[in-house]
Amino acid sequence: MIFQANLNEAFRSLASAKQRTALALIGIVIGIGSVIAMVSIGSMAQQEALRQFKELGTDVLTLEKDFLADNDARAATARGLNLNVVMGLPTAVPAVADVSPYTQGGGGDVFHMGKSLTQASLMGVTASFFAMNKLMIAEGRALSDLDSNSKFVVVGAQLASQITEHSGLPPTGQQIRMGDHVFTVAGTLAKASQAALRRFDPNTAVMVHITSALRLPGSEISLVNARVSGGISNDKAAADIQVHLSRQAGFPGVRISSPEELIKQMESQMRMYTLLLGAIGSISLVVGGVGVMNVMLVSVSERRREIGIRRALGARQSDIKGQFLMESVILALLGGLLGVVLGELAAWLVCRFANWQFAVSFTAIALGVGVSTAIGVFFGIYPASQAARLDPIVALRAS
Amino acid sequence: MLSLKGIRKSYKIGPSEVEVLKGVSLDVASGDLLSISGPSGCGKSTLMNILGLLDRPTAGHYTIQGKAVAYDSDDELSNIRNRCIGFVFQQYHLLPKLTALENVTLPMVYRGASKALMLERGMRTLKLVGMDGRSHHKPNELSGGQQQRVAIARALAGSPQLILADEPTGALDARVGQDIMDLFLQLNSDQHITIAIITHDSHVASQCRRQAVMRDGELHE
């Protein structure tokens, strides 16, 4: 009964000083909001990383030229990765099931029937590239190793639709020009989802066979994907590759990274972001808590006579304390709930922007409610104790 | 029923001690209608605060129904105030945001009474003071006399041993004040409610069966 009476009284009191209540809420709302945003964006980023991880496979290593390699290899870094050595990896190293090197660079405006359509990057790929990167052909055909030194290309979904839009013709069989080179479109890719583990955007790419691409001046293999054979760990495969490559004369030092490492990198970036939001959140929570305390102190001093009356009618100190504590908790909870809404909204916006899947985080909501209740209690206990300790006679005489 | 023996109360004002009550003894029997009057500054408010357990005496004994008041427990004092004393103040002291009925039932809230019991008792006491038609009005929608009637109903609602009225007619004009006095007289004679009225108004005091006068910290009957 007292609980219910205190609850009613808390709402009545907060409603009678709306402006003050609203101002006190701002700090809590921002604080809880950023904590919620932080937690839910963090968890969604993790989900997203996991999704990408699963999509591209957990068994694909990435080989890059290592610019920080030791002296022996440094001279060799001037040269690119040798295509024959790379393509020989599955035969030479049993731990490697398949390789897919590619070149990236060059590119520029794409012309079709004399009109500039868009900017695209020119990639040199092998036949294994499409399966390795989980890219699907929409129309026409993929490149095969029979396309060596040819000018047949596969174009990304976005470029394909631009060609159709511009000419009204199906893209396959069309001729496009990039710089001095005229290519024939052999196939188009289905739209590929954004994946941070891919270091290129397949939707805007023009893909030619790697042998053709390597004939362009200054062109070299920028990256090699290697699929690890079943039953062998990524670390073992990486070590075997390193051993094999170190025996190849003139081959530059390589850095091998696994998807785990890429995800770790992403996570450490997220951690920075989370820390920043966490700091903002904690500061605003303290500021918000002080705001709550301030409002409660004002409320107590304004209602001294009421406290005196209640005491005269038989309210114990604990009843008075409970009443004001209830008020501060309700105040903080109101702020917390608004903060949860704000935080989820922010998370939703980030998801939309980043093309992630949005899910309401119930952990975050529970956290918001819990933290705001704790703030209400922590910053409300001092004003409430002051109210409870008032001398009834003095309180009754207050104006 | 209530018994004060040798109650002394002194305050420290600067370096000197001022004794406001110099050994007051008073027995209040069930059904009494008692007035305590005297000029301002004579110590009647202090006596009322001690009778109402809002203040602690410096020396002396206070027993309620044969039981000595335990001054060391604030919760116990609150409890006795809640069950044994019903306050009526000069300024009514109703809570402005509560309706008349909610004000009346407030003492019962602190006993953990059920909602049904509070409603029933609240309406019954409001009827006793002739305010049952205004149960859902807020204090600022009521006249001074009506507010004081609600305040009396609040004092009665907990069925205390003693109604302690501090200048209950002080803020009212003479006619309305007399209505309130008539209500006290009627509650005393019909319901046998024990009432102590602290007043400086000799006309009010003269209507009570027992009349005590405070003078210089001492009580004379």
Image (cartoon, coloured by chain):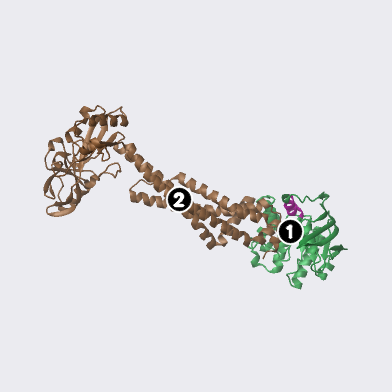
Q: Main secondary structure of the magenta part?
A: helix
Q: Which residue is mark 1?
A: B155
Q: How packed is label 2: few (under 14 Cα within 10 Å), some, or many (20 or more)?
A: some
Indicate the position of residue B13 as horizontal and vertical percent values.
Answer: 76, 63
User: In the rendered structure, the residue with mark 2 lies on which chain?
Assistant: A
At label 2, the amino acid type is Ala
Outermost residue on the right side: it is: B221
Q: Quadrant of residue A399?
A: bottom right
Q: Is residue A350 visible?
A: yes
Q: Which residue is labeled 2 in the image? A: A279
- Locate residue B147, reporting x and y percent: 69, 65
Give the x, y percent position of residue A317.
68, 52
The chain under label 1 reads: B
Residue at disc 1, secondary structure: helix
In percent of width and height, residue B38 lies at: 82, 67
Q: What amino acid type should be assigned to the residue bearing mark 1?
A: Ala
Q: Residue furthest bottom?
A: B174
In the rendered image, which quarter is residue A151 located in? top left
In screen coordinates, is A41 left or right of B198? left
Residue that appears at 80% across and 56% down:
B58
Camera-side residue of A71 and B88:
A71
Chain letter for the green part: B
| Chain A visual colour | brown
Q: Of A261 and B74, which appears nearest the observer?
A: A261
